[in-house]
Amino acid sequence: MNPTPLAPHHSFVYDGTRMNVFYANKGEGLPSHSHSYSHGTICVAGSCAIRKDGVEVISTKDSKPINLGAVDWHEIEALEDNTVFINIFADGKY
């Protein structure tokens, strides 16, 4: 737990939706935090642990997107090298 902080590799807006794309190696990700808006997250390569409310979910390219609600504490950590995950939310919230 407590992944090494990571900045988005790509960040862009499409029709009012912000997408932050993260390329992560094992142990990198987004340390525990919360914010005033909800967002979805999806792992598209490799695997990552998504932790919220004391529960850990392992996400892979075959997993469904996960909703992280407003003010929910959460963190995302890559479990292997070459992991790619995307956070999706309304632009102007971040």
Image: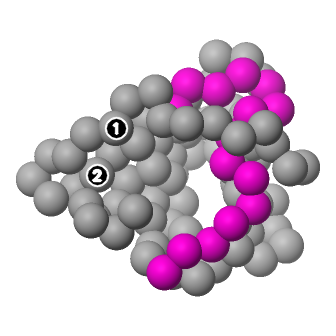
**Picture quadrant where residue 7 is located:** top right
Asked if residue 86 lies left or right of residue 2, the reply is left
92 on left or right of 52? left
The answer to whether residue 29 is magenta is: yes
Region in magenta: 22-36
Question: Which residue: 63% across, 79% down?
Answer: 72
**Residue projecting furthest to the right:** 1
What secondary structure is the stretch in magenta mostly built from? strand
The amino acid pointed to by label 2 is Arg
The reply to whether dot 2 and dot 1 touch (C-beta < 8 Å) is yes
Q: For mark 1, what is the residue?
A: 11
Residue 79 visible here: no
Q: Which residue is mark 2?
A: 18
- CA gap between label 2 and label 1 equals 7 Å
Quarter of the rendering occupied by the C terminus: bottom left
The x, y position of residue 74, in whole percent, is 69, 66
Question: What residue do we see at 72% from left, 22% from top?
Answer: 25
